[in-house]
Image: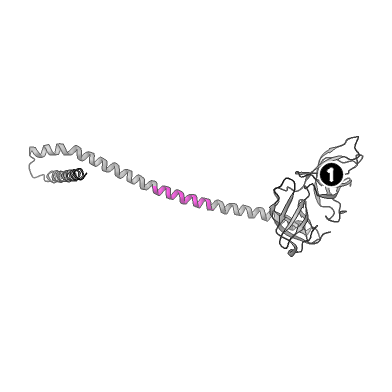
Amino acid sequence: MFSRNLLIVVGVALFIAINFTVITMSSRESLPVSGIERITISLISPIQKSVTRTIRFTRNIWDTYFISVLAVKENIELKRQLGKAIEIKNRYEELELENTRLKKFVNFTDSVSDTYIAAQIIARDPSPWFKTIMIDKGAGDGLVKGSPVVVSEGIVGQIIKVAKKYSRVLLITDQNSAVDALVQNSRVRGIVKGNNQDNCSFVYALRKDNVKEGEMIVSSGLDQVFPKGLKIGRILKVTKVHSQLFQDITIETSVDFDKIEEVLVYKTAR
């Protein structure tokens, strides 16, 4: 291994010496060129050309590598700046949406005389057998069990459990929920019952009562929980069976429970 490395070193040194000699002789135009010099030049020139091309090729590759590295770094920095810009834009849009929701709350609370407290939804029950949510206000904020929970679109539910800083709300879509209600136009009375689905049922409306699809169902206030006149939903389907005393009525809730993030709670139950 040592002899091989030594030969390589000697060869490289010899090559450099010959190149230096040729370059020196070529630059001395005043001296005559002998036959040996011509032969040496003839032998060395192709090698010099090859070496020059190799050096040029290597330099180009090296330059390209540095350019690529700089381009990659610049690309990473631009992506970082773009990500930051997108994040700021998303925050701005989120604040705009939140501002719109809060404006609805303000307009709603201005239209009624009762005292409300705003709360944020912090959890949802993942179980298919219960329709409840958790809010970030509790007994320390003046809330009590049975307090009605609403949004500007309509009724959400009522509080069933209260801790100092948190409360659990039973949604009107839960099968254990019941709200005394009226058909807004005809004043036909019934009960809005949850069925653990997105829609609710309007039960105990007599078959003889004139109830139409598209009519609005509102709270009657007779259950002593929800104030009178709050929206619950629109009648989606009406089915009358001659052998039954009551109609089968399905209503679509005014509130989209999958999208609400803030709610309003009465400080005192009605």
- Disc 1 marks which residue? 202
Q: Nearer the viewer, residue 204 or 98?
A: 204
Q: Nearer the viewer, residue 214 or 168?
A: 168
**SS class of the residue under badge 1?**
strand
Left or right for 112, reference 166: right
Verify whether residue 155 appears in magenta.
no
Left or right for 104, reference 66: right
Task: Name the quarter where the N terminus is drawn.
Answer: top left
Left or right for 242, reference 107: right
Q: Nearer the viewer, residue 32 or 262?
A: 262
Q: Residue at x 24, y 42 (%)?
A: 52
- Is 206 situated above or below 94? above
Verify whether residue 81 appears in magenta.
yes
Q: Position of residue 89 (x, y in %)?
A: 58, 52
> What segment carries the magenta color?
69-84
Q: At label 1, which amino acid type do we have?
A: Phe
Question: Residue 16 is drawn in which quadrant?
Answer: top left
